[in-house]
């Protein structure tokens, strides 16, 4: 007997095959029984007729419960109304693993309860759909850079210097060398790699000991960070809009079914096409004030300001050239207005806020050293990074896109914690 995955059933129409999976729903009308199975590749309705199966098989069906693992054998029939377009007329049923009192029932559960049972909750239709969209986004990211001849450079997670914000570091003892920090970014390292390889990117988990309990923050998240030699801030924004449009387009093309499962209105996503709108930070503050916000020049944009501003556009918007004081030490000073830096954030529409932070990097040795000292950082820890400005310094830019925020936006989820299999938050380390 051939064992197949649900997604492959089309190739076996008319044949008798076996499918293995987990019981999603069960229902019977006395003589006919319906069993919906999930195997990770799709959903299958198996139909059993009391007349046509053995008494043992019929009895085994009666003993099934939600999330039991089973093997079902039967004939594959086209059924346009069935999910996936096929149905199985079952002749045999084997119980592989019983499931007694599965904790997650088809009813309302509290968020707290669901996250306590995240290891089981992952099996729900909605969570499976989110996982597939995330998978597509990650593959789209890799394909985008591969097609454009970027070289992937894996950067360390244990680091000796602060990448972004001193206040948000996880640290651990590192043998005789003092403290090591979990990477907040791979950026500093890809800058070094850009001088070797031209166009590079890193893609991995990053860590922020953020005390913020918002719907946009995790303590561990995945970030992709391209870095390009001889790109200025404008080139950088052009790359970002192509990149974001590609990712969204790919999700729309390849994950229609999942977005439907998530009841995502895809209209706003269809409009995500380059070029995106651009507004300077200074103009953004004025615009926000006109819209009733009390935002003052010099402050970073808060989540509410981002939402309000992004609502003014029908696609993502770049806010560029922020005040130096609210941004990281490595951003290049704006020669036309030294109070600001040559950076940008990319704000997603529909209230999702910042999905990208990017900038042109300070390429002048003395200015960079001054910024390091100004921020109270230890120049010794950045000796290697300063070297890049000593030996063939070069205009270069890059950015970081947060995978979870991007997936939350594409899926239309209210909180980013559902976009990763096992989210890490200040109050959550289990499961
Ligand atoms: O703006 P951030 O902090 O930028 C950097 O880390 C730069 N080194 C990137 C670079 O230029 N190479 O973070 C970039 C993105 C944010 O826009 C957001 O999408 C995501 O990373 N991000 C978070 N996602 C989830 N939880 C958090 N706590 C996040 N912090 C940042
Ligand atoms: Mg940022």
Image: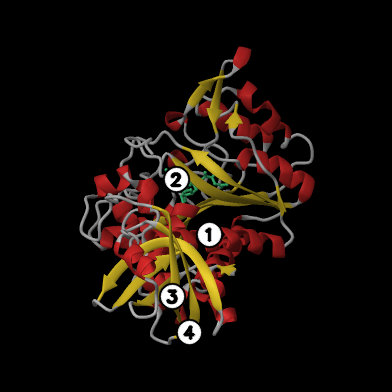
| Disc 1: CA contacts within 10 A as few (<14), some (14-19) or many (>=20) | some
**Extreme front residue here?**
55
- Which x, y percent locates residue 303? 32, 51
Could you say which disc has been placed on residue 90 in the image? 3
Q: Is residue 200 left or right of residue 223?
A: right
In this view, the mark in front (4 or 1) = 4
Mark 1 or mark 2, which is nearer the start of the sequence?
A: 1
Cβ–Cβ below 8 Å for labels 2 and 3? Answer: no
Element under disc 1:
helix
Q: Compute the Cα span from label 2 to label 1.
A: 36 Å
Choose between 200 and 310: the one closer to the eye. Answer: 200
Q: Compute the Cα span from label 4 to label 2.
A: 64 Å
In this view, the mark in front (4 or 2) = 4
The reply to whether residue 345 is visible in this rendering is yes
The residue identified by callout 2 is 323
Could you say which disc has been placed on residue 77 in the image? 4
Q: Compute the Cα span from label 4 to label 1.
A: 30 Å
The residue identified by callout 1 is 135
Mark 3 or mark 4, which is nearer the start of the sequence?
A: 4
Q: 297 above or below 276?
A: above
Residue 116: quadrant of the picture: top left
Element under disc 3:
strand
Residue 246: quadrant of the picture: bottom right
């Amino acid at each position: 007997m051939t064992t197949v995955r649900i997604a492959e059933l089309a190739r076996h129409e008319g044949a008798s095959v076996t499918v293995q999976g987990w019981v999603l729903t069960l229902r019977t009308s006395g003589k006919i029984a319906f069993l919906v199975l999930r195997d990770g590749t799709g959903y299958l309705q198996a139909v059993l007729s009391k007349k046509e199966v053995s008494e043992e098989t019929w009895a085994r069906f009666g003993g099934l419960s939600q999330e039991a693992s089973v093997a079902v054998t039967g004939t594959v029939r086209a059924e346009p109304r069935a999910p996936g377009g096929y149905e199985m007329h079952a002749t045999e049923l084997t119980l592989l693993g019983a499931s007694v009192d599965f904790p997650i029932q088809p009813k309302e559960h509290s968020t707290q309860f669901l996250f306590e049972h995240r290891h089981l909750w992952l099996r729900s239709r909605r969570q499976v759909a989110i996982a597939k969209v995330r998978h597509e986004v990650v593959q789209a990211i890799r394909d985008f850079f591969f097609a454009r001849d970027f070289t992937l450079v894996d950067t360390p997670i244990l680091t000796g210097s602060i990448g972004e914000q001193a206040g948000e570091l996880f640290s651990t003892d590192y043998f005789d060398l003092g403290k090591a920090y979990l990477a907040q970014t791979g950026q500093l390292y890809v800058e070094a790699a850009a001088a070797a390889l031209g166009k590079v990117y890193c893609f991995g988990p990053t860590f922020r000991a953020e005390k913020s309990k918002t719907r946009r923050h995790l303590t561990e998240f995945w970030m992709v960070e391209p870095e390009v030699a001889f790109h200025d801030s404008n080139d950088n924004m052009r790359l970002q809009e192509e990149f974001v449009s590609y990712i969204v387009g790919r999700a729309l093309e390849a994950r229609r079914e999942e977005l439907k499962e998530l009841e995502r209105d895809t209209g706003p996503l269809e409009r995500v096409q380059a070029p995106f709108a651009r507004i300077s930070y200074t103009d953004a503050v004025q615009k926000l004030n006109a819209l009733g916000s009390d935002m003052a020049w010099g402050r970073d944009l808060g989540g509410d300001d981002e939402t309000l501003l992004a609502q003014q556009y029908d696609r993502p918007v770049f806010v560029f050239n922020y005040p130096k004081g609210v941004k990281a030490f490595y951003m290049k000073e704006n020669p036309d207005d030294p109070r600001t830096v040559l950076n940008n954030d990319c704000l997603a529409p529909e209230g999702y806020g910042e999905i990208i932070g990017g900038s042109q990097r300070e390429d002048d040795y003395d200015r960079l050293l001054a910024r390091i000292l100004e921020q109270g950082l230890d120049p010794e820890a950045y000796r290697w990074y300063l070297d890049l400005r000593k030996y063939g310094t070069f205009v270069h830019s890059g950015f970081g896109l947060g995978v979870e925020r991007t997936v939350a936006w594409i899926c239309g989820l209210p909180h980013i914690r559902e976009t990763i299999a096992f989210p890490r938050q200040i109050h959550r380390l289990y499961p």
